[in-house]
Image (cartoon, grey):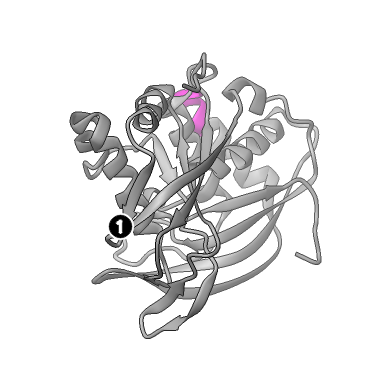
Amino acid sequence: MLRLVAEMPSELLIELVGEKEVSLPRFTGYISRALFLHMMRAVDPGEAAELHESDVMKPYSVTQLMFKARLRSPSGYVLDPSYPCRVGFRFLSDKQFQKFMSFFSKKNAVLISEVRFKIASMILKSIEYEELLKSEPVKNFRLIFRTPTYLSSMGSRYESLFPEPLQIFSNLMRIWDSFSDSRVFGEEGLEAYKYWIKNHMGVSAYVLRTGLAEMGKKKAIGFTGWVEYEMDEQEEWNKVTLALAKFAEYSNIGGNRTGGFGEVRFYSSSIEKR
């Protein structure tokens, strides 16, 4: 069994091979979450129940199902079983990771929409929290928002659909503090960081679009695209911001991040052609 020796963000990318075609919706993040919780329930029902609780900071996130479609269906796509399907499960705590890994000592297949998928391979990527903080300062970096993302607006029934740096990175710091076993910033550090963001960081360019994601009977609007952030280089908070941006690849960003929303990729400089 794979084993990590310290608390660290990690991603387990699983490759699955289906036995036959299956119809899948356009947005599959909630299917990935259901699969994750089902697998966790098989090894620890109590842990799975805790991870399913609402209004609790969750120590995991998921990606959408990644697959090749044979054709479009009225509600989405028909998966081509001659190509593998992939899904990523991210862990912010070693406790859940170790329990989850025990699933593979018992079973070698899972069900997705009542179709059996054999587990063909697994790839693990991980990095220690402390290692994330060793980034060299940069003036610009970019976040690619790969799946619909939305942010809560305090006191409003409407969600925020623009990735303002203050909202994005203060939220990431709260998630970091909840699961890091190394540096913890606390409320005092968070307030100091917010002040720095307001005075030393901004958006320099962006290309975003909004779209509707359907999750069974529920629907949510989110933005996708890219945003480039600019900040002062000669500041300690510069390194912290880069660490949080890289951490976001494991945590996801914003609302419903455990359901495949807010999946991002980090790039340390301008990439005009992406």
Q: How many marks?
A: 1
Judging by the rendered image, the residue that carries numbered circle 1 is 155
Residue 189 on the magenta span? yes
Which residue occupies the foreground of this view, 206 or 110?
A: 110
Percent across and percent down for residue 8 are: 52, 24
Outermost residue toward the top? Answer: 5
Pinpoint residue 226: horizontal percent, then vertical percent.
65, 62
Residue located 34% across and 25% down the image: 99
Q: Quadrant of the C terminus?
A: bottom right
Highlighted magenta segment, given as a residue range: 185-191
What amino acid type is highlighted by mark number 1?
A: Gly
* Whether residue 153 is visible: no
Q: Is residue 169 left or right of residue 134?
A: left
Measured as percent of width and height from the top left, residue 185 is found at 51, 24
Q: Residue at x 48, y 55 (%)?
A: 262
Using the image as rendered, state which of residue 16 and residue 150 is in the foreground: 16
**Vertical relation: 121 (above or below) 144:** above
* Quarter assignment of residue 177: top left
Residue 133 percent coordinates (x, y): 66, 26
Image position of 263 with respect to 83: above or below: above
- In the rendered image of this protein, does residue 185 appear above or below residue 117? above
